[in-house]
Image (cartoon, rainbow, N blue to C red):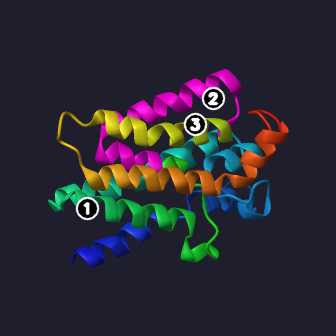
């Protein structure tokens, strides 16, 4: 049964919201433009703000839904994390799109909102601060991912530490950094575009 839930987690994550937005709004394959990502940032640059907001919310919802399903089934922390990871993997590497999906940020946020809404909101807060200060989405995304494990650790009270939650926060951080490796190179070179720039 639990393995079946992992499969459904992958299916949730692989729902191609950004790809569908491109096809419906402009008849384009968003993967052929810009960063090649199906995430909200690439949608914002090549389709528009309204589509990007919808894609962002849908991608967050995918993560939240998978964790809520796990909690509804009374699964323990380890299985909640496993389902969250399967959803994240589906988002990054969707079978329907030749394994070319998003960069793990919005769906990752949804997963952590589901696991611990306080951690999710605090991480979102880091993202908002960085995007407000610098207006560079990739910088805000990487900064939030770097802060995530620390925020998760600080969220534990006393000896009430969930090792699976801590491990998944580290894995999510590494996935986000890996998916943004080209952005990081451009950031170092001072060539990463800000919001509103092509």
User: Which one is earlier in the sequence, the residue at label 3 or at label 2?
Assistant: 2
Confirm whether residue 8 shows in the render: yes
175 inside magenta stretch: no
Image point (32%, 47%), residue name: 114
Image point (48%, 36%), residue name: 147
Q: From mark 2 to mark 1, how far is it between C-alphas?
A: 32 Å
Q: Which mark is residue 78?
A: 1
129 inside magenta stretch: yes
Q: Secondary structure at mark 2?
A: helix
> Who is closer to the viewer here, 117 or 31?
117
Q: Nearer the viewer, mark 2 or mark 1?
A: 1
> Which stretch did the figure color magenta?
108-137
Confirm whether residue 107 shows in the render: no
Q: Residues within 10 Å of mark 1 (few under 14, many from 20)?
A: some
Q: Residues within 10 Å of mark 3 (few under 14, many from 20)?
A: many
Position of 101 with respect to 73 (left or right) is right
Q: From mark 3 to mark 2, how far is it between C-alphas?
A: 10 Å
Q: Nearer the viewer, mark 3 or mark 2?
A: 3
Image point (27%, 53%), residue name: 163
Q: Which residue is mark 2?
A: 131
User: Which one is earlier in the sequence, the residue at label 1 or at label 3?
Assistant: 1
């Amino acid at each position: 049964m639990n393995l079946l839930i992992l499969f459904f987690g992958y299916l949730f994550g692989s729902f191609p919201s950004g790809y569908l937005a491109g096809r419906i709004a402009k008849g384009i394959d968003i993967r052929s433009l810009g960063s090649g990502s199906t995430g909200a940032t690439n949608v914002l640059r090549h389709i528009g703000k309204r589509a990007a907001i919808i894609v962002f919310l849908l991608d967050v919802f995918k993560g939240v839904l998978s964790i809520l399903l796990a909690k509804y089934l009374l699964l323990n922390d380890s299985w909640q994390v496993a389902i969250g990871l399967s959803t994240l993997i589906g988002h990054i590497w969707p079978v329907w799109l030749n394994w070319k999906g998003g960069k793990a940020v919005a769906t990752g946020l949804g997963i952590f909102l589901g696991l611990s809404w306080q951690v999710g909101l605090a991480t979102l807060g880091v993202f908002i601060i960085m995007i407000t200060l610098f207006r560079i989405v990739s910088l805000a995304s990487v900064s939030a991912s770097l802060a995530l494990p620390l925020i998760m650790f600080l969220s534990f009270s006393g000896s009430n530490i969930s090792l699976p939650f801590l491990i998944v926060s580290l894995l999510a951080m590494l996935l986000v950094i890996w998916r943004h490796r080209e952005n990081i190179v451009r950031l170092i070179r001072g060539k990463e575009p800000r919001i509103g720039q092509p």
